[in-house]
Amino acid sequence: MSEIERYYAYQTLFSGRRAIPKSEILKKLEISSATFKRDLTMFRDRLNTPIIYDRDLGGYKLENPDALQQLPGLWFSQEEALALMTIQTMIGQLEPGLLGPKLKPLQTRLNKILETQGADAKTLSQRIRVVHAGKRRLPLKSFELVAKATVDRKQIEIIHLNRQTGESIKRTISPQQLIHYRDNWYVDAWCHLRGGIRSFAIDAIENCVLMNTDAKELDSEQLQQQMQSGYGIFGGQAKAWAELKFTVERARWVQHEEWHPDQKGTLHKDGTYTLEVPYSDERELIGDILRMGSDVKVMGPAQLTKQVIAIAQGLLKQY
């Protein structure tokens, strides 16, 4: 029986009688004397609901019978508290202004739970580190407004910088979901200017205004199909499948990686590995191919092979 299950068992046990012999408690809850002793400490220190022994009645009872009904409905074991604090620490390092203030009351309570069980919550953040690579500076105000609009289901008016063309365009969008991808934040939204689903880098939003107009709602399955069909952050219907063959050395890593939810992988007898992934826009895929250097070869389609060769030749000219 878990700790939370025992709590409810104690609640039932003490709700109908004034005092209960220890032997009956151990039998009903199927616990040892040592566990019962720990439970007494838990109720006293963590839940502020002491269970005391009444010599006159020959059993245990609640010092304040009404307190058990007033106990908070959300409390955790040491393992659960550690897991939650680990997640919170990672979120804080991921984006300090995202949930920190909102989770402050929960953090205080988790700290108390861990301290009563001999764990040092204060050093937890020193033992967990999130390493960022290629993280772009995020305008916190824009992020908070986009996040609020996404949760509250409201439209927002944005000025978004298209880094490819260098043009800033004013748009009205209906945010659907926030995406954290490769250390950067994006918002998948219905673009009212273009009349379709688009993904916007939040750090490229130069200005953001929250509107009172309700956001356009999209079917979740439609959204997932649209935004996950292509490779990486680029949405849209997949136009082709890339076939990549990795060397024996690189295959030891790649065969355990997920490049796309619908990928197909084949480990060959000679130790090489073939990976097939769909893509709608080849830019990010080509970047990942080049990152692998000579450890990967594009087997198809022919157009993708030509593009990689052209970029590789351009790279040689730089040297």
Image (cartoon, helix red, strand yellow):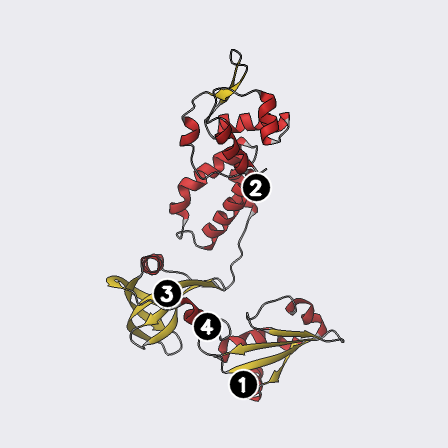
Horizontally, residue 213 falls left or right of residue 32, namely: left
> Neighbour class for label 1 at 10 Å: few (<14), some, many (≥20)?
some
- Closer to the camera in the image, 82 or 308: 82
Q: CA distance from mark 1 to mark 3?
A: 33 Å
Answer whether residue 120 is visible to the viewer in this image. Answer: no
Mark on residue 79?
Answer: 2
- Residue at figure coordinates x 52%, y 41% from the top left: 81
Closer to the N terminus: mark 4 or mark 2?
2
The image shows residue 126 at horizontal and vertical percentages of 54, 45
Q: CA distance from mark 4 to mark 1?
A: 27 Å
Badge 1 element: helix
The image shows residue 6 at horizontal and vertical percentages of 54, 34
Q: Are the two marked residues, 4 and 3, in contact with CB atoms closer than 8 angstroms?
A: no
Type of amino acid under label 3: Gln
Q: Are the two marked residues, 3 and 2, in contact with CB atoms closer than 8 angstroms?
A: no
Closer to the N terminus: mark 3 or mark 2?
2
- Above-or-below relation of 87 to 160: above
Horizontally, residue 249 falls left or right of residue 285, namely: right
The residue most toward the right is 270
Type of amino acid under label 4: Gln
Closer to the N terminus: mark 4 or mark 3?
3
The image shows residue 173 at horizontal and vertical percentages of 31, 69
- Above-or-below relation of 137 to 107: below
Badge 3 element: strand
- Above-or-below relation of 117 to 219: above
Q: Which residue is mark 1?
A: 307
Q: CA distance from mark 4 to mark 3?
A: 14 Å
Q: Quarter holding the N terminus?
A: top right
Mark on residue 176?
Answer: 3
- Residue at figure coordinates x 64%, y 69% from the top left: 254
Tell me the mark number nearer the camera, choosing from 4 and 3.
4
